[in-house]
Amino acid sequence: MRKLTLGEWVDVAELVAAVGVIVSLLLLVYSLERNTAALQGGTENVLFESHTALSSRLVDDPSLVEIQLKVHRGETLSALETIRWNTYQGLVLDVWAMAWQRHHEDLLAERHWRNWDVYFTDLFGNSDLRLSEKRWEELVDGFDPDFWAHVRTAVIGARAKTATTDDTDRG
């Protein structure tokens, strides 16, 4: 067996170094994926905790429950009740805006974003949290324009389609 020349040892060293760089890059990619998953999981927890805290308000505060019942029955709210209800709606809308923002920063996984988006679209489109078009227009300046365009398409656009379908069904 012959001995390697200095040039051949350099070639072997370069090959070993290249393999080391590739292994390091693979480990880096793996670490980044784990870190991204951890960040996305943390975001999901923040959204869930924020929403749970708001939902708990309804359970813990009988006067807020009374306001929701009035809204549900279509009764007129007092000025103070209107302020409290509008504030509550705004806080829940803030959670949707946070989900949208985190999704666009790649901090919320696509599947989780879709679930939250469907939930909030239904919540603001079909439940007691439904906002009038006038109220939507009052809130527009407080949110990211791209988020607001999404909301208009998801909620108000869906209402227009439903109204058109209802009118067609009646005609």
Image (spheres, rainbow, N blue to C red):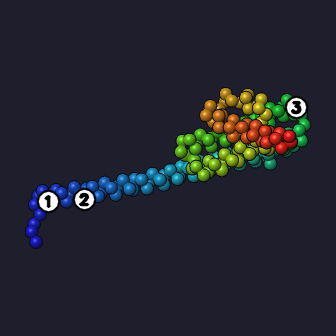
Q: Please, what secondary structure does the residue beneath circle 3 have?
A: loop
Q: What residue is disc 3 on? A: 78
Quadrant location, the C terminus? top right
Image quadrant where residue 6 sits: bottom left
Q: Nearer the viewer, residue 161 or 78?
A: 161
Q: Amino acid at mark 3?
A: Ser
Give the image location of residue 144, x and y in percent.
62, 32
Judge whether 62 appears above or below 33 on screen. above
Q: Earlier in the sequence, mark 1 or mark 2?
A: 1
Give the image location of residue 115, x and y in percent.
66, 50
Q: Is residue 109 visible?
A: yes
Residue in the image at 30% along x and 57% along y: 20
Task: State the CA–CA distance, disc 1 to disc 2.
Answer: 12 Å
Give the image location of residue 22, x and y in percent.
33, 55
Q: What residue is disc 2 on? A: 16
Q: Residue furthest bottom?
A: 1
Contact flag, marks 2 and 3 (Cβ < 8 Å) = no
Q: Nearer the viewer, residue 70 or 18?
A: 18
Image quadrant where residue 71 sits: top right
